[in-house]
Image (cartoon, grey):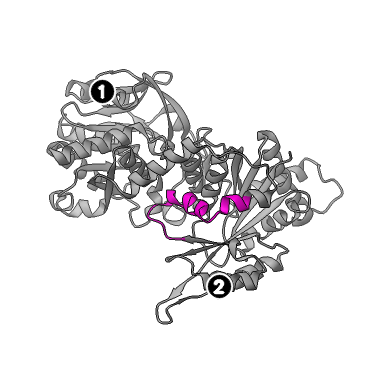
Amino acid sequence: MPTKYIVTLGSLMSGLGKGVLTSSILKILDFNGYKVLPVKFDGYLNYDCGTMNPYRHGEVFVLDDKSEVDMDFGIYERFLNKSLSGDLSITGGKLFGKVTSKERNGDYLGEDIQIIPHLTNEIIKQVEGIAEKNKLDVLIIEVGGTVGDIENSYFIEAMRQLALRNEVVFINLTYIPKIDVVGEQKTKLAQLGFRALLQLGIRPNFIICRGTEPLLEKTKEKLALFSNLSKEKIIDDSDQKTMYNLPLHLMHQRFDKMLVKELGLKRKEIDKKRLEFWKKSVYRVVEPSHYINVAIVGKYTELKDSYASVKEALIHAGSANETGVNISWIDAERLEKEDPESLLSGIDGLLVPGAFGKRGIEGMIKAIKHAREKKIPYLGLCLGMQLMAVEYARNVCSMDGANSTEFNPSTKYKIIDLIKSQKYIKQKGGTMRLGSWKCNVIEKNSIVYGSYGESVIYERHRHRYEFNNKYRAALSRKELKITGVNLDSNLVEFIEWSDAFGIGTQAHPELKSRIESPAPLFVSFVKAGLDNKIR
């Protein structure tokens, strides 16, 4: 049977949660035994997300194959419980680069190159190629941005053309506001969005309605009248206690059955065992038996999406421990000016995530010192591991002014430094140590071995600076434990305190955490926080 396609589009405003909706649809079809994958289109002309500011775009998500992609790929992986590949990320930059390269190679000799048909043909070729290569039952395509954006207009046109030769179901995500003064749900925005799609030659098969409150029957009826859809195909996507409940919420409305019928797929038996496990995991998120307080000290705390994977990894680890995790977001610059005792009082765990640049670094180091001296469980990710080593060098090993050369190139004690392979790189995009790397656990009596239970592990990376091996012996003599190393390149991957739960990893284990398979290091960290609270 040829691959079927689903295209999810947002109308009138961004930030409604197309990524969560697309992931929920993926999960519903996955529960039902269909082979599915997502494709994400982003209209920006960057080749990928690697050089984007987290404040503008949210976190950069990294895949096993070194691809730097949109943060929605993190949501896809968390729902599907599957690692994805970079060819599923299509950007405007990649598309225009591909067409220009073909033109230079003479593939279009004699033709003037245009958006239609050359660019749209390239999009269709890539999409159908992904479906054929992976032998998919269904390929779900999320169109970034909103209907009406110049940046995605040619891609939406390509989707219209895709539907001329394939079975395609279009799903429109829209917003239903409730105006407090009036006290009723308003549908005009949804109507305008629907009409905008009609003008582009696309008639949605379903309208999914985001809102703060459940969709009223009279609102469904009004939208159904204006869209020529049956009332059942106007679907509620109101706020949930956790995004992981959305697949269940959609299934409760029989959306799964209607979607399978609309696609013309042969019905399969749902995997009840996996569905029940998902339900139990979601229940533990919504109704935990315990709570702990974790402080995240970072540079981008004003935009929580900058640390989306960290936040979700704590939720997953909390579910595994039947523990809710209350997060205090603390701007590292505040700690440079204020006493950590007041800002970090009442916490059961401290986490310092990855980042780039000098701003706020001294505040992070103060927080790490506070956690070490108070024996508060600590987890350092990437930069958080590097600063854990810097703090130990300064305050335990008496290396005054110890630092990373990223922040002070002339420091006497270069605890963190560029490795040789990074020193002569000029280009910024895709040139860091990226993707999945092997780590050998060299100390079995360690947090890392107790967490993973294996001597060889693989985690994803995204960084340029590394632990400087010149200082391994000096720090080890003062009982900073080196517990994990990439033996192929002799790079330190894990360091630990000897007398309390404190671990830093050069990797980003949060990127592989899923609700069905939480990141082991986060599970141990949450458990240590719970033990610390009880103690």
- Does the magenta portion include 258? yes
Q: Which residue is mark 1?
A: 446
What residue appears at the point 33 percent right and 54 percent down from the top-left corner? 301
Which residue is more in the foreground, 208 or 485?
208
What residue appears at the point 15 percent right and 31 percent down from the top-left corner? 396
Farthest-out residue, bottom? 181
- Magenta-colored span: 238-259
Under mark 2, the amino acid is: Leu
From the top left corner, tell me how far across and down residue 187 is, in percent.
54, 73
- Does the magenta portion include 211? no
Q: Which residue is mark 2?
A: 189
Farthest-out residue, right? 110
Label 2, label 1: how far apart the Cα atoms are: 56 Å
From the top left corner, tell me how far across and down residue 278 is, in percent.
43, 41
In the displayed structure, 261 sits above or below 431; it is: below
What secondary structure do most residues of the magenta stretch adopt?
helix
Instruction: Place residue 418 in its image quadrant.
Output: top left
What residue appears at the point 55 percent right and 54 percent down from the top-left corner? 254
Does the rendering let one see residue 210? yes
Does the rendering let one see residue 377? no
Instruction: Specify whether 186 is left or right of 227.
Output: left
Instruction: Specify whether 58 is left or right of 261.
Output: left
